[in-house]
Amino acid sequence: MFWKRPSLLPGWCGNRDTPLNTPISDLTFTVFDTETTGFAVGSTDRLLEIGAVQVKNKEVWQETFQMLVNPERDIPASIQELTGISMETIKQAPMSLAAIEAFLAFNETANGAIWVGHYVSFDLLVIQKELRRHQYKIDMPTCIDTLDLIGYLSPSKHMLDLEVYASQFGTRIYNRHQALGDAMTTAHLFCELLYHLENSGKHTLADLIEISDISKKNIQF
């Protein structure tokens, strides 16, 4: 099974060497989302699911990734109702380290993939905290937040809700509060945003990083 392969973690690295002048149309993006047992991921809450899909040439590709995670703690009733993930559902699921390794392996199939998420700082924090619990640390790849792209294109928009933005930009909406469904929704929204950005004169990786500089954000939960 996917998570039984030899560990990628000790030697895995991100895509920091991708030239900044690389055209957006030449980039591969891994759009991902996580579900958790709650927002206190720095303390008691844990990773529950990872979902991802790849975007190439401003199109959502068929390859997807989805994996439930055994959080090694009870799932609150409110989260079970929201996500549809129950204690019975995750009984045979892998632990977080194995799930993250499988997610990294999915990224390996798209050499140089840039990570993308909606409010991606939270998802990055989830992965970092889970790795730290197992005494691992990896260099995170270049990450783009769709919220920042929306803020650049439409400065008056201040809401965080993914479904609201997808509706406003006329893109598809998949199963909400499921990692793969939210990743798919984000991916289609991201493709639409890329078209708007290119029409605004933004054509390279450097342009995306300038708009969405995750390194400047310090989010704690």
Image: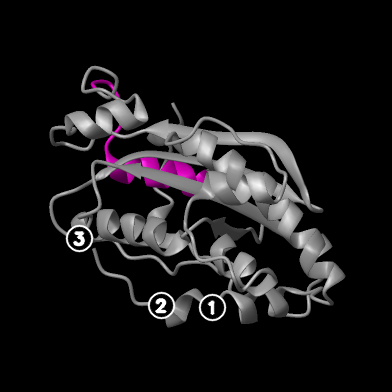
Q: Which disc, if any, is residue 22? A: none
Amino acid type at image mark 1: Asp
Amino acid type at image mark 2: Lys
Residue 18 coordinates in the image, percent (x, y): 68, 73
Residue at image coords 49%, 49%: 104
- Residue named by callout 2: 217
Q: Pick whichever, 26 or 17, lies toward us.
A: 26
Q: Which secondary structure lies at badge 2?
A: loop
Residue at image coords 13%, 51%: 44
Q: Which secondary structure lies at badge 3?
A: loop
Residue at image coords 19%, 32%: 75
In the image, the segment drawn in magenta is 91-105
Q: Pick whichever, 174 or 1, lies toward us.
A: 174
Residue 66 coordinates in the image, percent (x, y): 48, 33
Quadrant of the image containing the N terminus: top left
- Residue named by callout 1: 213
Amino acid type at image mark 3: Gly
- Residue named by callout 3: 42
93 in magenta:
yes
- Label 1, residues with CA under 10 Å away: few <14, some 14-19, many ≥20: some
- Splitting the image into 4 quarters, where does residue 135 fall? bottom left
Quadrant of the image containing the C terminus: bottom left
Q: Pick whichever, 73 or 108, lies toward us.
A: 73
Mark 1 or mark 3, which has the lower sequence index? Answer: 3
103 in magenta:
yes
- Label 2, residues with CA under 10 Å away: few <14, some 14-19, many ≥20: few
Q: Which secondary structure lies at badge 1?
A: loop
